Amino acid sequence: MTDLLDVIDELTKPKVEHVAQRTDGGEWIRTHTVDLPPLLQRMHDAVWPSSNTDTSSSSSKHERSPLDVSALFEYAKMCAAIGSWCRILDVKPTRDPIKDLRAWYAATLKVNDFDTAWYLREVRKWKHTIEAHLDPPKAFEAKAACPICDTTGWGDPYNGGSSWPIEIRYRITDTGRMADETATCRACRTVWHGHDSVMELADELGERHAEPETNDNGVILT
């Protein structure tokens, strides 16, 4: 259950990051250390970003940060699931998701034939959901039809749709490299995960949309 504990640690324990500072030209300046709260705490803070949101606060309503509804929805689902998991294993929830998740994990160690794989998938989804919310990936559209469904449009272009269905998402690491690349056809829901898969997709799209070779008279060569 080491993998499960690793993800739970990321959700419930503080983290130290070494962040590289660079100039606008990409030259390295120095590295400084940042202490980050647990992911669940950071998601909680994303829901209520202002420290002056309690009823006793002297700040006026217009000075307070707005509630992040999308973060609240995801955070509430996580807290509800943790509470449910605790009750299944006779662990009394405290309404502190960090304490409750760790208490739940300790209880799972006493369970025979525990379905680690299912719970591991769930907590990994939480981790990815929180990270995506805190640090949204960059995205762009591939100007080509999907090679799977051959669609050249997606949804209503006047209401959130687009002329191109494939969206590519990625992150930039501290070293300036692309990472976590994913391509999704929003029409047929085909997904390409990882750098190699996305590069293969790019090669295929390039071949499909390459201009045909012609002779001196403009006749297409087969």
Image: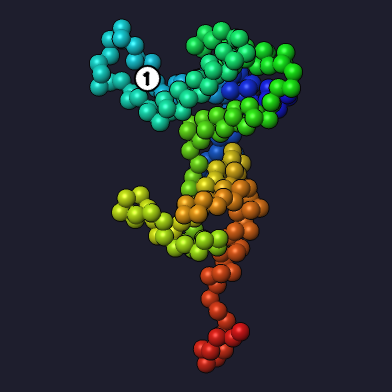
* x and y percentages locating residue 194 in the rendered image: 63, 47
Looking at the picture, tell me which residue is in the foreground, 178 or 42.
42
Q: Is residue 93 left or right of residue 163?
A: right
Indicate how the structure is coloured in the image: rainbow
Seen at 55% across and 29% down, the residue is: 126
Seen at 65% across and 16% down, the residue is: 105
Mark 1: amino acid: Ser
Seen at 62% across and 56% down, the residue is: 199
Residue 101 lies in what quarter of the image?
top right
As drawn, 200 above or below 76 = below
Q: Is the N terminus in the top left, top right, bottom left or bottom right quadrant?
A: top right
* x and y percentages locating residue 60 in the rendered image: 25, 16
* x and y percentages locating residue 53 in the rendered image: 34, 15
As drawn, 10 above or below 181 = above
Number of dots carrying numbers: 1
Q: Is residue 122 left or right of residue 75?
A: right
Looking at the picture, tell me which residue is in the foreground, 7 or 151.
151
Q: Which residue is mark 1?
A: 50
Q: Is residue 53 left or right of residue 166?
A: left
Seen at 60% across and 64% down, the residue is: 204
* x and y percentages locating residue 173 in the rendered image: 59, 40
Q: Is the C terminus in the top left, top right, bottom left or bottom right quadrant?
A: bottom right
- Extreme residue in the bottom direction: 217
Residue 26 lies in what quarter of the image?
top right
The answer to whether one can see residue 42 in this image is: no
